[in-house]
Amino acid sequence: MHEASLALELLKITQGVLAEHGGSRILRVKVAVGELSAVEPELLRYAWEAVTLESPAQGSVLEVEFFPARQVCPTCGPVQRSPGSWLPLCVSCGAPLRVEGGDELDLLEVEFDVNGEKS
Amino acid sequence: MSQTADVRMQILEANRKAAEALRRRFSQEKTLVVNLISSPGAGKTTLLEATVARLAGKLRTAVLVGDIATERDADRIRRLGLPAYQILTGGACHLDARQVEGALARAGFGALDMLFIENVGNLICPTSYDLGEDFKVVLLSLTEGDDKPFKYPAIFTKASVAVLTKVDLQNIVDFDVEAVETQIRTLNPQAQVFRVSAKTGEGMEAWCRTLELALAAKRA
Ligand SMILES: Nc1nc2c(ncn2[C@@H]2O[C@H](COP(=O)(O)OP(=O)(O)OP(=O)(O)O)[C@@H](O)[C@H]2O)c(=O)[nH]1
Ligand SMILES: [Mg+2]
Ligand SMILES: [Zn+2]
């Protein structure tokens, strides 16, 4: 359950972004969460709702973009897979596969109100 | 009027910076640092007791151990006459780099060859936090079931060493060791996998040799 710690970090960073741009209220925050980031998007959304209460981000939307990991064959390239299932070997040539990507845990965008007006 | 700022940074940027500072320091001090991660009770402290006891006399080791409460684990290491420091996280399910930095300042270990960091018992949360270690070790005990690597893939992709613990129980529990090793290699083809029993000593030599080789490589 480190989603609460992550949401707190996110609030700190986004408040910094808000101050830097002279914004008044955070409306939407977009994050990237990879399949191998050890983060549950749904739990992160709940945590965001909780930590933003009484803050300039209260009521804001946390948009989570999910990034699956890729399994890559050294000769045939990326193989088809669905999140959560893992192929033991390349379906075309039988070679062992590398796992790439899917560890994203990034802040991408912050949308905010300027001049205290509603959008 | 609304405006959108493109940010693109890690959510754990602050931890990443603290971890990089630790990594530079460990590299200057030439201390090998290992971050041990497993679910509660997989045998982290028991493996460390056996490991530091074996290395004592040869190498200067110390253990930092994170738990939500109690000094029990650090006490177990100190009972061997070896240095240990307990980090109490007060509820947090993982260690972060700042806690390690603070604990090192208070522990006063002096010069070390190897520092072992026993993370809070949890197979998920510690995965996200870099502690400046040379590598992560994931432990999986035979009593946890042989489906765990695919159920908790994140830590198995990030740990360069996997230790299957309590292998003395192999005839008691249904645990397909080969199947688990296949899952681990699928997630991380480079991973080194050890079968260890801290109780009987099986596999301890190979595990300790790997640590010593890693230390030698860091000092080369
Ligand atoms: N049979 C057997 N039991 C073991 C072995 N290693 C550990 N145990 C037992 O497993 C239990 C948990 O071991 P610990 O070393 O305390 O586990 P831990 O991972 O440090 O636990 P937490 O710090 O609470 O997460 C203890 O009762 C140990 O005696 C082993 O190799 N064989
Ligand atoms: Mg322990
Ligand atoms: Zn192929």
Image (cartoon, rainbow, N blue to C red):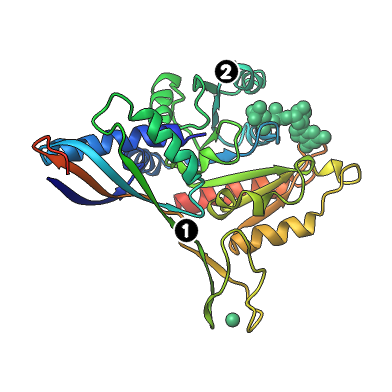
Q: Residues within 10 Å of mark 1 (few under 14, many from 20)?
A: many
Kindly identify the residue that appears in the image at 75 percent across and 45 percent down: B196
Outermost residue on the front side: it is A118
Q: Is residue B11 visible?
A: yes
Image location of residue B119, percent across then percent down:
55, 33
Kindly identify the residue that appears in the image at 75 percent across and 47 percent down: B203
Image location of residue B41, percent across then percent down:
70, 31
The disc labelled 1 sits on which kind of residue? Gly
Q: Give the numbered dot on residue A102.
A: 1
Outermost residue on the right side: it is B171
Q: Quadrant of residue A28?
A: top left
Are discs 1 and 2 less than 8 Å apart at CB? no
Q: Give the numbered dot on residue B69.
A: 2
Residue A78 located left or right of residue B22? right
**How many numbered circles are shown?**
2
The disc labelled 2 sits on which kind of residue? Ala
Q: Chain of mark 2?
A: B
Labels 1 and 2 within one chain: no
Q: Is residue B88 above or below residue B154?
A: above
Residue B104 located left or right of residue B207? left
Label 1 CB, ligand 3: below 8 Å?
no
Q: Give the numbered dot on residue B94.
A: none
Nearest-to-viewer mark from 1 and 2: 1
Kindly identify the residue that appears in the image at 36 percent across and 41 percent down: B12
Quote the CA–CA distance across marks 1 and 2.
33 Å
Q: Is residue B40 above or below residue B28?
A: above
Q: Residues within 10 Å of mark 2 (few under 14, many from 20)?
A: few
Image location of residue A12, percent across then percent down:
28, 33
Q: Is residue A110 above or below residue B94?
A: below
Classify mark 1: helix, strand or loop.
loop
Q: Quadrant of residue B124?
A: top right
Image location of residue A103, percent across then percent down:
45, 54
